[in-house]
Image (cartoon, rainbow, N blue to C red):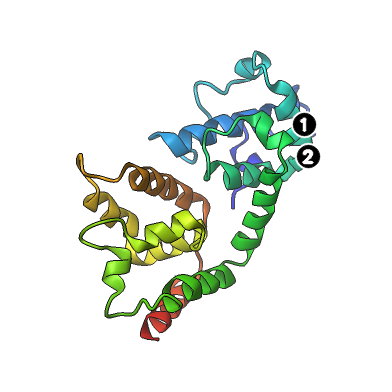
Amino acid sequence: MPTPTDYSSQGPRGSTSDVPIGYETFRIHTALRAHFTSKYDFFTYKGLTKNNRLDHYRNCKPRYYYNRLEKKYDRDILGFLISNMVVDPTIFVGNMFEDEQYDKRFKSWIGRTQSLPYTFEQDIKRCIIDQGVTKVNCREYFFPLKGVPPLFNDLLLGRMSNESFIILNTLLKISDKWSALNKGIDGNPLLIERNFRLTKYQKFIEVQNIEDYRKSLITALDK
């Protein structure tokens, strides 16, 4: 997981620059909104956009909230913003400061991302083993010829985490196949939007030891 200073245009807090506290949070928030809703890539442009220069921040009305969030989360601010904006890329910064549900979501995200093997194991048990998905019928779960994939319904209902979906996507190229199945006027707009957002989110999740996850999936489908 990258840190804010990996993508800082001004240097870490405490440097000799005159960048006001809150600017980095404003910059990252603006860049992530573009990343999750457009072709803009956070990594390619290192979190910089035409709308998040320092002069934009100085003219930004909700500076108070950016300042308070940066003081509260400091070097955790990138994770805090990612964990919430992958759910809703258009969240108003004031809501994230005032409503504790966003802090709870961040803490839950930390638990999942720091224990990816356990997260994957639990999600696979709940969504594949307990629902009777096997090698024989798994195509209907992942890639049905008609209708919404049951896997997508599990995502919407929170039974499958975004992180476990990313692991499955690494193994099975689900996003590409869903995109192919949902082209044209008959495509499901909710699936298309969520699939796009998760594809952009995947760049922030580093999946290690992928063959261990493959073995876990095969074992689950054999039951």
How crowded pointer 1 is (Cα within 10 Å; few <14, some 14-19, many 20+) is rated as some
Location of residue 205 in the rendering, given as x and y in whole percent from the top left corner: 52, 55
Q: In this view, does 78 lie to the left or right of 48?
A: right
Residue pictured at 53% horizontal, 74% vertical: 121
The reply to whether residue 28 is in sight is yes
Location of residue 146 in the rendering, given as x and y in whole percent from the top left corner: 21, 58
Q: Nearer the viewer, residue 42 or 157?
A: 157
Marker disc for residue 72: 2
* Type of the residue with mark 2: Lys
Q: Are marks 2 and 1 in contact (CB under 8 Å)?
A: yes
**Rendered view: 182 above or below 119:** above
Residue 99 found in image quarter? top right
Looking at the rendered image, the quarter that the C terminus falls into is bottom left
- Which residue is disc 1 drawn over? 68
Residue lying at the far bottom of the rendered structure: 223
**Disc 2 to disc 1, how far (Cα)?**
6 Å
Q: Nearer the viewer, residue 134 or 200?
A: 134
* Type of the residue with mark 1: Arg
Q: Which of 158 and 161 is in front in this view?
A: 158
